[in-house]
Image (cartoon, coloured by chain):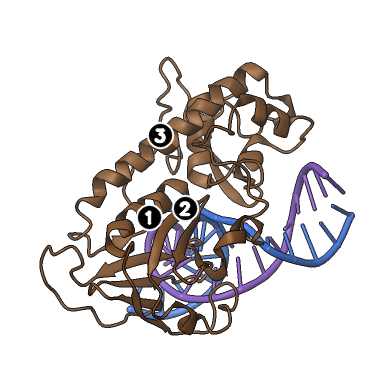
Chain colours: A brown, B purple, C blue
Amino acid sequence: MPELPEVETVRRGLLPVIEGHTITNADVRRPDLRWPFPDNMANRLAGQKITSLRRRSKYLLVDLASGETLIIHLGMSGRLLISGDPLGNFHHEHPAPEKHDHVVFDFDNGARVTFNDPRRFGAMDLGATENLEDHKLIRDIGPEPLGNTFNASYLADRLKGRQTPMKTALLDQKIVAGLGNIYVCEALYRARISPRRKAGNLSRAKIEILVPIIRDVLSEAIEAGGSSLKDYRQTDGELGYFQHNFRAYDREGEACQTPECSGKIDRIVQSGRSTFFCGRCQR
DNA sequence: ATGTGTTCCTGTCCGC
DNA sequence: TGCGGACAGGAACACA
């Protein structure tokens, strides 16, 4: 469920709490999430200092002093919760483990980070930091949408000849990293592109419009998440979701907000997932 | 290679 | 209040 902006928000919230700090203990409370945890994960984490905390697409990359990187994916329902008093705001005890608290990390500064994931579509793995680009989970992912290599020329090239609908193309992590169901709907809505439009048929002009819109949608969401970070203590240290106003997503039946458009938001299903769009202004 | 459907798992919500 | 079905922010995998 968390898409790129939510994962980035989690990264930013976690950064001041764990970077430069050492994991004193990792409590691995079940053998797997989506896949089995790597061999000996708890021992490979214990005693390790966090040298940096990065993000690639929807993956959090926790670099360890050992030369390994902990790769974390939140799946649909994964959350990271911070407890303790790492930033010296005020004191409280760690809460007792709750249902679906699968991995608990304790740090030398008193912080505790708990990975909670009811549906267990999340994942964790360890890989050599040096060769992380070649890791199975990372290697085929397309460019970061907020980076320079994601531009109209690149996207045009990737969409060329594709029969798949635009909705599906943008959800494909090999084409562009980090977009999920919500932000694909939002970007296509703002760009007035039909989610059913065959990817290979999208005009160059529309691609030129779409690329900066994808950037805007994601940047705005990160900013909204960032502004909620200040208050993360009040929200029980929960990182993973935040409130955001969507213009099309989950607005079935509501009036289209596009100026001069008298349409309403419809819901259709594409490759098994809900798409929200306005059939009147999105072409 | 490209496109599509299925699958993993739990929780919530809505209609009867 | 209970029950069944639809649905949920992901993505690997199997198969046409």
Q: Earlier in the sequence, mark 3 or mark 2?
A: 2
Secondary structure category for the residue under label 3: loop
Work out whether residue A280 can be spotted.
no
Mark number displayed over residue A147 = none
Q: Which residue matches tag 1?
A: A11
Q: What residue is pinned by disc 2?
A: A55
Local packing at callout 3 (Cα closer than 10 Å; few below 14, some 14-19, many 20+) is some
Q: In this picture, is C9 found above or below A24?
A: above
Q: Are marks 3 and 2 in contact (CB under 8 Å)?
A: no
Query: With respect to residue A237, does A251 lie above or below?
Result: above
Mark 3 — residue?
A247
Regarding mark 2 in the picture, which secondary structure is present there? Answer: strand
Residue A22 spot, x, y in % from top left: 34, 73
Q: Is residue A262 left or right of residue A125?
A: left
C-alpha separation, residue under disc 3 versus residue under disc 1 = 25 Å
- Pointer 3 indicates a residue of which chain? A
Residue A184 visible: yes
Q: Residue at x 62, y 47 (%)?
A: A173
Q: Looking at the picture, how far across and down is residue A137, in whole percent?
A: 62, 60
Label 2 vs label 1: CA separation?
7 Å
Q: Nearer the viewer, residue C5 or A256?
A: A256
Name the amino acid, label 2: Arg
Q: Amino acid at mark 3?
A: Arg
Identity of the residue drawn at 25% across and 44% down = A227
Q: Earlier in the sequence, mark 2 or mark 1?
A: 1
Marks 3 & 1, CB-CB < 8 Å contact: no
